[in-house]
Image (cartoon, rainbow, N blue to C red):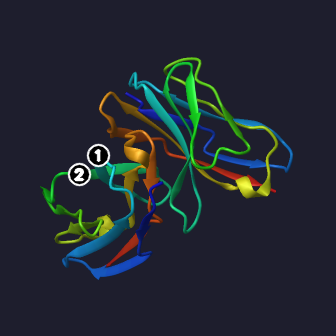
Amino acid sequence: GEDVEQSLFLSVREGDSSVINCTYTDSSSTYLYWYKQEPGAGLQLLTYIFSNMDMKQDQRLTVLLNKKDKHLSLRIADTQTGDSAIYFCAGEDGGATNKLIFGTGTLLAVQP
Amino acid sequence: NAGVTQTPKFQVLKTGQSMTLQCAQDMNHEYMSWYRQDPGMGLRLIHYSVGAGITDQGEVPNGYNVSRSTTEDFPLRLLSAAPSQTSVYFCASSGPRGITEAFFGQGTRLTVV
């Protein structure tokens, strides 16, 4: 089955760019996802990328997918204090779109 | 439009007690899932359903039961709570495009003492 790994913590200064990295093992995912979790809240789907794409940009967010290395990254430009949260990458177990395998989550701390 | 509603938000149980975590969605979604979130382990899939009357096991199903008698509701039952089930539980639902339309509830924080 899918195994997804992330670094646990990232600290950046307000206005800098943040890059959160993720590696995965199962190539059968049709989509790969990034979720955001604010303190005490549920998960919010931030963005996703179709597996045959290399890059997707959505306002301040850029997702890069390296299928050869099975590496996914999320870049947040001009990081704000409101971006402080836990960010999860997720893949699909066996390509099933309703069975997600989540990474451990990366806590992003934005310093003013 | 309430989205995905979970109740209760917090619960403390004694070992051996049973309880049901409720999840309801008002988006007519076919797919519903239960995850548990533990520190350093991300979210793990407990059970899921692809429609009324159809359920299946996820990664960590032991100690939990589910049923899906209606499209709207997907309750999670703990038959005999154990301290290892102390966790935050999230319910999710998604529509016909699958998880790309996923919505998560606010979570239920369960402590088993």
Taking B40 as reference, is A101 above or below it?
above
Answer with mark 1 or mark 2, whichever residue precedes in sequence.
Answer: 1
Tell me the amino acid under the disc marked 1. Answer: Thr
Pinpoint residue B27: horizontal percent, then vertical percent: 38, 25
All told, the count of numbered labels is 2
Q: Position of residue B101 (x, y in %)?
A: 32, 37
Q: Is residue A30 above or below residue B27?
A: below
Q: Which residue is mark 1?
A: A30
Is mark 1 in CB contact (under 8 Å) with mark 2? yes
Q: Are marks 1 and 2 on the same chain?
A: yes
Task: State the mark number for residue A51.
Answer: 2
The x and y percentages for residue A5 are: 43, 68
Location of residue B96 by image quarter: top left
Q: CA distance from mark 1 to mark 2?
A: 5 Å
Choose between B97 and B22: the one closer to the eye: B97
Which subunit holds the residue at mark 1? A
Image mark for residue A86: none
The quadrant holding residue A68 is bottom left
Q: Residues within 10 Å of mark 2 (few under 14, many from 20)?
A: some
Q: Position of residue A10 (x, y in %)?
A: 36, 78
Residue at image position (32%, 53%) is A33
Residue kind at label 2, given as amino acid type: Ser
Q: Chain of mark 2?
A: A
At 40% across and 21% down in the image, what residue appears? B28
Where disc 1 sits, the SS reads loop
Residue closer to the observer: A25 or A92: A25
Residue at 78 percent of width and 57 percent of height: B83
Q: Quadrant of the C terminus of chain A?
A: bottom left
Q: Is residue A105 above or below residue A18?
A: above
